[in-house]
Image (spheres, grey):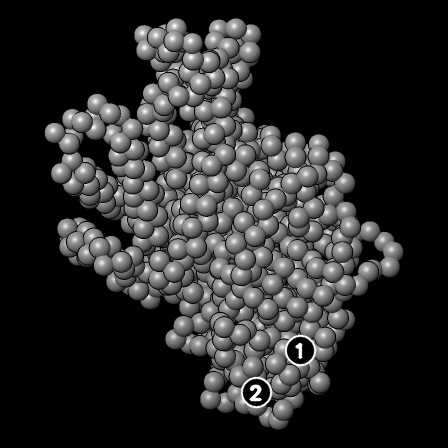
Amino acid sequence: MWLLRRLGLAVLTLWLVSVLVFLATAALGDPVRAILGRDYDTNVGRREQLEAQLGVGDSIVTRYFDWLGGLLTGDLGTSLANQQPVWGQISDTVVNTLVLVLLAALVMIPLAFGIAMISAHFRRRRPDTVIQTILLALAGVPEFVTGILLVALFSTSVFNIFPAVTLVSPGTRPWDSPEGMVLPVATLVVAVTPYVSRIVRATLLEVLDSDYVELARLKGIPEPVVMRKHALLNAIVPGIQVVALQLAWLAGGVVLVETLFSYPGVGRQLVDSVRNHDVPMVQALSMIIAGVYIVVNLVADVLSILLTPRARTAISS
Amino acid sequence: MNRNQRPNPGLSRRQLLRYSGLGVAAVAGSGFLSACGGDDGGGGGGGGGGEQRTGGILIHGATGGGSKDTLDPHQPVQAADIARCCNLYEPLLFWNNNFELEPALAETVEPSQDAKTWTIKMREGVTFHNGKTVTANDAWLSIRRVANPKAPFSAGGQLSQIIDFQSSKVVDDTTLELVLNTPYAILDTLLAEYTLGIIPDGEFDPQNPVGTGAFAFKSFEVGKTSTFTKYADYWGDPAFVDELQIQDFADDNAKVNALQAGQIHTLDNLPYNLVDTIEGAGGGVLVAEGGQWVPFTMRVDQAPFDDVRVRQAFRLIVDRQAMIDQTLSGYGSLGNDLYAPLDTAYADDLPQREQDIDQAKSLLKAAGAEGLQVELFTGDDIGSVAVPAANLFAEQAKQAGVQVKVTKKTPFYDDDYLSYTFAQDFWNTRNYIPQAVVGTFPPEQGGTYNETHWDNEKHRELVSAAAREVDEVKRNDLLHQAQEIEYEEGGLIIWGFRQQVDAYASNVQGLEPSKYLPLGQYKFHKVSV
């Protein structure tokens, strides 16, 4: 029941997003004029073709429902830039981006929790202070700066260990040459880990101060076990939430990283499409990013509920 | 990170014009076209000395590229497309690196006395990548595809209007006779465009593109990578490398990083601010003279510019070298208010106009325009050079007591374009005759982009007479007279021409600067790694 309501809310959100995406792309002005530039008046044939494709002339409501109908039946439309179906062009890049984000998550989650545990263990002593200072500094650096520094350090200026950009040979996937994935993943990890780590540390500290942890200690349970079993499990719920937030951010925020590393993912494609004023592509990509956002949050909510006994009981009753 | 050094690799109108110079007029279905005009002296150095090594894979990092990528020989859009085009396909004639015509798939292209009938003799023994021999019929059908009167491609705008499709004929396997409906003495320049590659039966198959170039098609992924193999039976000098890879780059930093990390061997359109970085890291920088220009346009039919003294005063206000230094980082050559610097007819004997504030002031005084206030329209969609140049002009005009209000429009190219009293525009380089027609003739006579509303019958007659004149000396004399008129009365302020800057890795040999296209016209068969 609860799950159904959550799903309903997710669908509602997605629908609202679709309205927003559509209105936003429609409000950007006349895409035909933007595409044709100074040829608008001279190239009548192309203008009429584009206008027919975009349904210029129909009311905005008609156009919205045409588009929504297509979206629901899996027809994302045709790209204005090259007249190819949108889905065929974005399916590969969506997978590429998901793999990049997942790899980053796989590295980031254990790393962030590990750092948080070490930090909490040494709380307010020298190691903790050092770790917190570094994390704060990293959190303050934008991810593209991190990326540029990593490239300078590991591929161009200092060492020449990893490739600076992801070059994908025809017929292969980016991860077929794993060394090319290292720097993009590392950049994302560095960008996201500080936030997660700091939240988890704060929660851990709160839990470590609580009565039941005190009791566990008094019962003589060794500190590592206290940390793992009693503290971490209870600190995990806020952790999941912040991980979800960060992953959702990554789904859209990889734009800069993908551009920097020439990684063939949705971010780069979105930038390209915006430059092309390729409205159907922009709409499709925005919806996919929004969809990922909503799904990740939904999963996080469900996980949080399952891991919180009190909430679990509340729902089942 | 000077991302704004060269915005929007890919889609901007500027790039479009730059790489398919003829595109605009062609699409418009009017206007004479051909490409490029010129300037003397190519700069830069390409590749080291010594014996060139054979074998290996050459990886080129191309600027731009994206979902619009195409392999079509006749409608390339971005730098990546042009690089592919130049290696797969070849036209009947080549522009060489010094912007002079050379035989290619045709051995000779000769006009009749009246310049109405042109005889094209094909080179014998040239084969397509599929093994078929190239015939005059292939050339004719390719020209017909490009010059289809209903929908001409970029190289075919002018051709579609002057070719008499009924009377032109394939005489035999090696002879094609093009009959024109009007004398046109520079038809050969139209046939030398890289966008007029010869393909079998004039049919383009996107799945299996076939041409005569030094590299044959292997694979193509839109917006990502394309690969080509050395064509063993190439009629010219065969390629040094076994395989060519062209990699699209949407971002300048990524491109330059890839070169520094040794992942690519060459890249086109290096941002000026990264020249030192590349040279410091041991790479090579290739600088070539070019002919792209961003003029100020003054409407000669509206006050205050309907007074020729005001126009000349404005031309004297500009500090041309400062424009080049500040908006092109010094990578430019001086302009003299004349276009087509690469054309042999370019009037380089006219005195170089320089900033002369006193003279400008007295001209303005004589015209009763002291303390003049004007609005200058500019916009980012003209190109990255435009807005800085406009602001700099406003600064320079202050010295002459002229107040210039710079108005940045988004977009610049809207319904007001071609109506602005004082504005800017972007042009790729082309030879004088086609440029004069498209830019200075009335719209109904082919002047699709006549920003200044220039309407000078004497000038027009000189240009038209030149287009009919087969003798080059006489033709250039007519064009010289035409240029003098524009030099004295025209509505364009042409302060400079942009140079082309590309880069290559230290192990790359064989690159030569070309005035025609970036990276030695992308002729990768001359390059070894």
Return the residue nearer the eye: A111 or A20: A111
Q: Quadrant of the C terminus of chain A?
A: top left
Q: Residue at x 38, y 30 (%)?
A: A243
Position of residue A260 relative to residue B39, above or below, is above
Instruction: Judge by depth and name the residue closer to the eye, B237 or A253.
Output: A253
* Lower position in the chain sequence, tag 1 or tag 2: 1
The answer to whether residue B411 is above or below residue B220 is above
Q: Disc 2 residue type?
A: Asn
Q: Which residue does the image show at 66% across and 78% down from the upper left?
A: B105
Looking at the rendering, in which quadrant would you find the N terminus of chain A? top left
Q: Quadrant of residue B220?
A: bottom right
According to the picture, the residue beneath numbered tag 2 turns out to be B137
Residue at image location 26% in from the left, 43% down from the top: A21
The extreme front residue here reads A219
- Asked if badges 1 and 2 are on one and the same chain, I answer yes
- Badge 1 crowding class, 10 Å Cα cut-off, few under 14, some 14 to 19, many 20 or more, is many
Mark 1 — on which chain does it sit? Answer: B
Mark-to-mark CA distance, 1 and 2: 13 Å
Instruction: State whether residue A223 is above or below residue A185.
Output: above
Residue at image coords 72%, 78%: B233
Q: Position of residue B254 (x, y in %)?
A: 58, 42
